[in-house]
Amino acid sequence: MRKKGFTLIELLAVIVILAVIALIVTPTIFKILENAKEAANKRTVNGIIKGADLYYTESLMDASIASKFDGFTNVFNEIEERLNHKLNEKGNLYIDKDGNVGVSIVLDGKCYKKEFQSSDISSSDDKENCFLTNEIKSSYAIFGGIYLDNFRQVIKTKDGGYLAIGDTNSPKVGTLSSHGTKINYDGIVVKFDQKGKQQWYQNYGGEGHDYFHATLEEEDGYLIAAKVDNLDDRSNVVVVKYSKEGKKIEEKTLITSKELYYIDLLKKENNYYLIVTGRGIDPKESSAIMMNVIKYNSNFEQEYVKGYTERYMDRAEKAIINSSGNMILVGMADGNLGFLEGIDKKGSGFLLEIKPETGEILSITTEDTFTFTNVVETTDGYIAVGWNGMEAERDATIMKYGKIKESSGNLPLLWSKTFRGSSSEAFQAVAVQEDEIVVVGSSQSKDQDMKDLNPDGIITGILIKYDQRGNLLEKRKIGGSKGENIQDIIPIADGYIIVGYSFSSDGDMFPYRYGNSDAFLMKIDKNLNPLKDFNSQIFLADSVKTLIKNYGTHIPSVEGAETLKLYTTNDPTKDLGKWCTSRLTIDPNSNYQSVVCLKPFNEGDSISHYYQTLKENHHKIDTISSDNWISLDFYYGNAGSIELSNMKLKFEGSDYVTFQEAVDLKYIEPLVLIGRDAIEQFSFSNSYNLLSGGSSGMGFFPGIVIKFKPKIKLTDFIYNSSKDTDLTQGHFGISEYRNFDISLTKTN
């Protein structure tokens, strides 16, 4: 007898029942597996924490280790090594000065975190923001990522807090990611309360470089003037408005130009005034680079454009509205100022008084070979600050002028003071409070006025106090051992607020640093001492990794320039490409597309010397270390046509050799880089030949950069030039890069 089978309907019913059971059971099974995985990962994190506790206990008996725990110390690599590198994950493991452990780590695509004062381990899917936060009692607040972060300006807000603006090229800052796909700058704005705690922050930008230059507070928010570099090699000035809560509520493009520099923004009554240097802003002078004042109504509709100069890099640096309602404008004229009678010398600092309603010049005051960067008004005059001399050997300078014009049209100079060393100093900003004047800036000297303040000769922040008669009352360095620059200062009731950037994590900047340089806001008292009055929030995130050295076996070829990838100590995990410039064209003889960008993020790690070029050049080289990278920089921006040849190096105990011979003899590493960030028209016709001792070919206003790493001490350098040039026509420079390296190998 034949057995009866299942009907199709019965089979379908069974399948449906099984599917329903699967729908009910599968999530439960997955949840069980997920919970088991999470529990296992939390056990892993607990093991890491116990390892850190043991490491800290052992450190108490080892003075060389214990000295590390004076702030927040990341010991992830040490503990991961003790675990025989079993983690294969990225994370942060911090121990504070009291031995408390905080950890944040991504395991199986999830973020696991334990804060310092907590015993619980939390988990979340937000692996992009997997970092620790903590609050410290400090004199400063910091903001930044792993690359370069800077505050350019600070204002005191009506609620008693502070608003700082600047720029960053870090791919991630706090919870913000860069707007560009390359290492480009974004503008940054950070709102702090009066205790230095971040209330909100925003970044602004696109695929090109974007910089915040100047800011004003309005009743309903904050206006910021930004320079926006487009990918078509043009730039815009954009005004951006943020609400008091940090939401971007408006933006408007004011002007577009081939070249833009130095932007400031003022307001008087219901009108805004944009001060900008650029090409073709004034339609009557479309080809000239000019300093311009542009008047707008309350809706930012243009009312006039006034151009005041007509030479390359004449520029306005800072403007204020004085007590009479007029505009005071300071800057520097690089050539003859066509529309400013009386300024006819190269490098003249100027102070202009302008009637803002019409743009009419009321007075012109000039100083030969000066650059003015900032100005403030006093009851009886103006204080202008800046520097005097060539960039490599600048002297910081402060001048006081009276308010009543002399017969020459100049304001009377009441006194002038110089702050100098054997290297370079510059004043950037000035604040006046009662009878005192405080000036901020930077210095790279270790002698003369900087004696005992800067023994290592790094670029460091400086604070100088004068009285109203120009007597120096006090001076001090602000920062640590890696270098700082102070960009702005404002007076407050019990002292001053300063902003800038820092590469240090010690000294005045103790105890933490996010990456290469961090933007900082610091409170100082009236005696110029940091005042620990802030409750600063810090993000404890990944630090820069260690470079794997690989210099190759031969000098890279021109043919391989477009595909060559290089990694530096700035960030050994990626080729940073054109992080230092927005230009899109290169010298066709380059063997790497961005040779000029291969330099330390920290300017203080670049020691430079400049020389004029003669037909026959012989330079003695005295380097700090035979292990440092060397950069040879030739620039002939005002020299017309010129040719270089017979370029050779001499090392300790050697004869003169070409670059190629030096590689063959193992005097230098094979990774020799040559090129320039310029269009073919302004390049040598065959600069790569210089590496074998040949001719560069003729170039029109050309330049070239050669970078190499010696293996033994370099002592001499020779080359021939087709003509003599002075320093105003062109120059040859030697830079030595310390704490910096380049490699062909990427660090993972």
Image (spheres, rainbow, N blue to C red):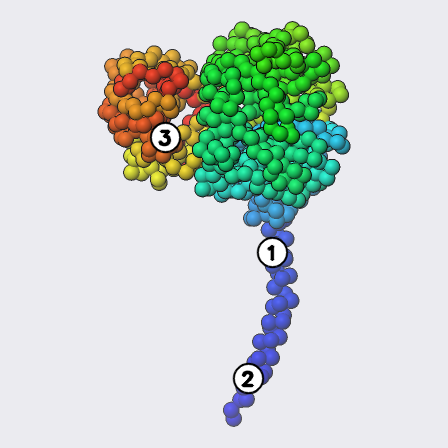
Residue at the image point whose x is 46% and y is 23% from the top: 739
Depth check, mark 2 against mark 3: the one in front is: 3
**Element type at mark 1:** helix
Residue at the image point whose x is 46% and y is 25% from the top: 311
- The disc at residue 498 is none
Residue at the image point whose x is 28% and y is 12% from the top: 653
Residue placed under numbered mark 3 in the picture: 676
Q: Is residue 384 above or below residue 677?
A: above
Task: Write down the quadrant of residue 699 in the picture.
Answer: top left
Q: Amino acid at mark 3?
A: Arg
Q: Is residue 731 above or below residue 36?
A: above
679 lies left or right of 9: left
Depth check, mark 3 against mark 1: the one in front is: 3
* x, y percent for residue 278: 50, 32
Query: Is 351 in front, or is 480?
Result: 351
Residue at the image point whose x is 50% and y is 13% from the top: 368
Q: Amino acid at mark 1?
A: Leu
* x, y percent for residue 114: 66, 39
248 lies left or right of 231: right
* x, y percent for residue 127: 59, 45
Q: Amino acid at mark 2?
A: Leu
Residues packed near mark 3 inside 10 Å, few (<14), some (14 to 19) or many (20 plus) = many
Query: Is 446 in front, or is 81?
Result: 446
Task: Write down the quadrant of residue 498 in the picture.
Answer: top right
Depth check, mark 2 against mark 1: the one in front is: 2
Q: Is residue 723 above or below residue 565?
A: above
**Element type at mark 2:** helix
Residue placed under numbered mark 2 in the picture: 8
Task: Write down the quadrant of residue 540 in the picture.
Answer: top right
Residues packed near mark 1 inside 10 Å, few (<14), some (14 to 19) or many (20 plus) = few
Residue placed under numbered mark 1 in the picture: 33
